[in-house]
Every structure is written in C-alpha cells, then in structure tokens.
Image (cartoon, grey):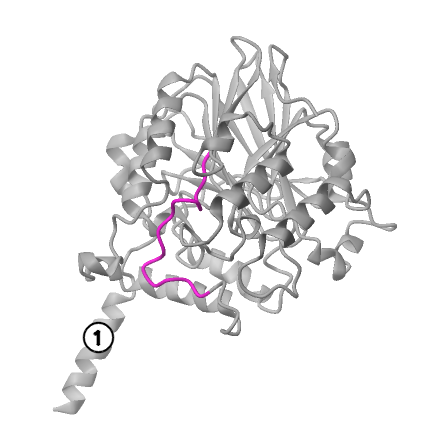
Amino acid sequence: MPQSLESKALSRIAFGSCHSRNAFDNGNDAAIGSPPISIWDVIRREVNPQAFLWTGDAVYPPRKVKGDAPLHVLIDEYRNMLFNSSIGYSSFRKGIVVSGTWDDHDYGGNDRGKELPSREKRRDAFLDFLGVSPNDDRRNRLGVYSSIDLGEEGRKVKVIFLDTRFHRDTHCIPSVGANPSIPLGALVACTTRLLTAGLSLPSFMPKWSGCTNDIEMLGDEQWEWLENEVELSDASVNIIVSSVQVLTSNPVVESWGHFPDEKRRLIKLISKLPGLVLLSGDVHHAEVLTAKPKRSLFDNDLGSIIEVTSSGLTHSCEEPFYGPLCAPILDAYQAHRYLGANVQNASLPSYYTGRNFGSITFDWEKRVFQVKIHDAKGRSVLEVQLKMDRATNLAESTISMPQCIDGSFLPIFVSCSGSLAHSLH
C-alpha cells in the first residue's frame, strides 16, 4: 500500500465511516444486489480512488461485547478487516493511500473521551490497522491526529485528521452510551444531550460542575499542532477531517456544538485556509452543512465553510427499530443545512438516510473540486462544487452560526414552572 501520493497528479479521493461486521449478520448487503457485493467493490467501481480517508468508526466490537471494548477485541476486528477477504477491504486497499482518524467505536467505547482506559495501546492498535510504521511520529503523540499531503506541486491537497476522542472532556451530562447496565444507553445519551442543549445547562451550571461552555475537545498539544499545520499549509485544497460533526445544530448527536468555545476557536483558525472543506462521519446519515445557513449552493461567491458528512458504509439511521424517527429529527434541526445539494431535487433537504460513502474529484484546470455522497449502489445523491485557492475568512461571523446549545426549551420550561407555581398558590 503506498504511503504517499506526493509528486503524483491527484484526481480522485473516496471517504467514509461506520463499517461494522455486525451489519453482515442482518443481511444488509443483500439490498445492494444479488449476489451480494461488497461496498468496497462499489467504491472501486464507481470512484476508483487514489486514496481513501477514514472519517471514524472503521470497526465496531461484536454485539456480544457490552460496555467498553477490550483491546484484544478491537485488534481482532482490525485483523478481520485487513485479512478476511469476504469483507472486501483487504483487496480494496491495495495500491491506494489509506489514512484516517478514529471515532468512539474503534476508540473502544460509545461516546467515550479522555476517560477511557488504555488510550495509548488503543492508539497503537489503530495505527497498526492503518499500516503506520513503528518509527512514525504518530506513535509518540497523545492521540491519532495527523496530516498528509497528496498531489504534485501547485496541485497539492492537504488532509488534516483531528482526534476528537483522546483529549475530549465528558459531556455536560456524562453519556451513559457505554454503560452496559442501562438499557438503550445510546438513546438515553441522545436524550441527555437534547436536554442539555434545550435547557442551555452550561449557562447555569457552576465552573466546578464540569458543565460549562469551555470544556475541551482537542487538548493543548493537539491545538498547538493544528495551528502549526494551518500556518504552514501551501495546499490549494485543505480537507479537515473531524469524526464528529462540526457545524450541525442538531443537539441529539455528539458534535463540536456541545463544545461551543472549542468550535468557535476551530472555525476562526481554519477559515483562513484556501479551498477548505470539512469531512465528518459518526451520525449514520449523509448531509451537507454550512456555516452560513439558508444559502443556496449555487451562490457560493460570498464564501462559506462547507461540511460534508458520510456515514455509514454498512448501516444507517433508518435501519434500527427507531429508524422512522431519523428523517423527522433531521427535519427538525435544519438551520445548519446547505440548500440545493440534493441530486434528485434541489429543493429537497440536503441529507440522505441510507448507507453511503463519499468522493472528491479535482478539476485542476478549472480550479474547482466536487464532493459527492453516493448511495450503496454508487449513485450520486448529494453533490457540492467548491473553489480551490479561496479562503472564507469567517472569523468575524462565527457568532451568527446556528448553535447547538440554544436554550430552545427554556420558554416552555419557564411557562410550565410558572403555571405550576400558580397552581400551588
């Protein structure tokens, strides 16, 4: 597997997240065709990428594992991905650059952050999966954050992978998603995040509570590294990969929105980069997001920061028993969503709830690049075209971005409290 595409012309990249062997147990691949074909075969056929970028959750522990996944379980899942030919990944990765970051499931615990034990050993197992050499600088970092340069001089693409797990503080109400003693812990965690945002709890909680707006996502060491990467970038296209969504206003999911000070700092820093696009995973649907809401994709002369989410490769939010809630929740939280990216109809919402993967193609003559979301058969369902070389410089307007923690439940809470107080008197 090549480790670099420097000095070679770059035209095609694929990306994706959330790949689970558990999905095969449900026969999900039968929906692609008969006989079943691997999602990796579809990506190879439709994109034939020169590089593949993991945006998180390359593996999941088996269903029988409850709570945090032991290290040996993750290593076994990585080995299956690399050597089990029936999955399709082992042949797909040959001859292309593969790099990426992790999210909570390949980190080892649902919704987990810096409190997870054995973080360094988990890091090493993930780097082994990526094929990182023992002498690589990443082996000595506190986390799996990294960057790669792809393409030839004057036509360079820089990819910066953030680690949103290793140093991340707990949520305002700590997630119970990994607690094996709580039934449907992941759904309970979604509810507590919703309540935190809707009641704007960080605005009322004391500093010592740990429930404040200045809780950390990246940690000092990673911030210093990131600032240096941004400062030194000479690329025409800069791709920032965050496993969790950055621009979303949806409080149900894990995102930078639950770490508002960190989010503002990130946007201010990266907005100076030319040809910028954010990639993310985690949420089991695909989506196009923007830092400037209610704007059309066809009106990008004003500039904005665009985020494209692809999740997941083997399963999606519409498949579990709560699947009918997926689209209504996405419709309820749409302030962050870009308009006009839906291939079927530009007036439809720019999200897709089926299994999916992403691609980026580069037109160096026209100095534009196109980011697409493909369904499980390879058909394009979401598309956005962006310009190279241009920086958005949104530092002064970050305060106007749709917020995740917005206190939207407070009027209802105050009204109900007033009614209760009145009835008691």
Left or right of 408 in this view: 290: right
Report the residue at 43% width, 30% height from top.
299
Residue 53 appears left or right of 225: right
Relative side of 198 to 207, left or right: right
Q: Where is residue 288 in the image (x, y as percent from the top left)?
A: 50, 41
Q: Tell me: residue 1, above or below residue 334.
A: above
Q: Position of residue 136 (x, y in %)?
A: 54, 25
Task: Sort mark 1 into few (<14), some (14-19) or many (20+) by Cα contacts within 10 Å.
Answer: few
* Type of amino acid under label 1: Ser
Image quarter (top left, top right, bottom left or bottom right) of the N terminus: top right
- The secondary structure that dominates the magenta segment is loop
Magenta-colored stretch includes residue 197 = no
Q: Which residue is drawn at the image coordinates 69% and 58% (left, top)? A: 22
Residue 319 locus on image (x, y percent): 65, 61
Where, by quadrant of the figure, is residue 394 drawn? top left
Q: Residue at x 38, y 51 (%)?
A: 249
Residue furthest to the left = 425
Q: Nearer the viewer, residue 16 or 129?
A: 129
Name the residue at 53% across, 8% down: 153
Is 172 magenta? The answer is yes
Residue 36 falls left or right of residue 333:
right
Residue marked by disc 1:
415
Q: In this view, does 94 lie above or below 355?
A: above
Residues in magenta?
161-176
Q: Quadrant of the C terminus?
A: bottom left
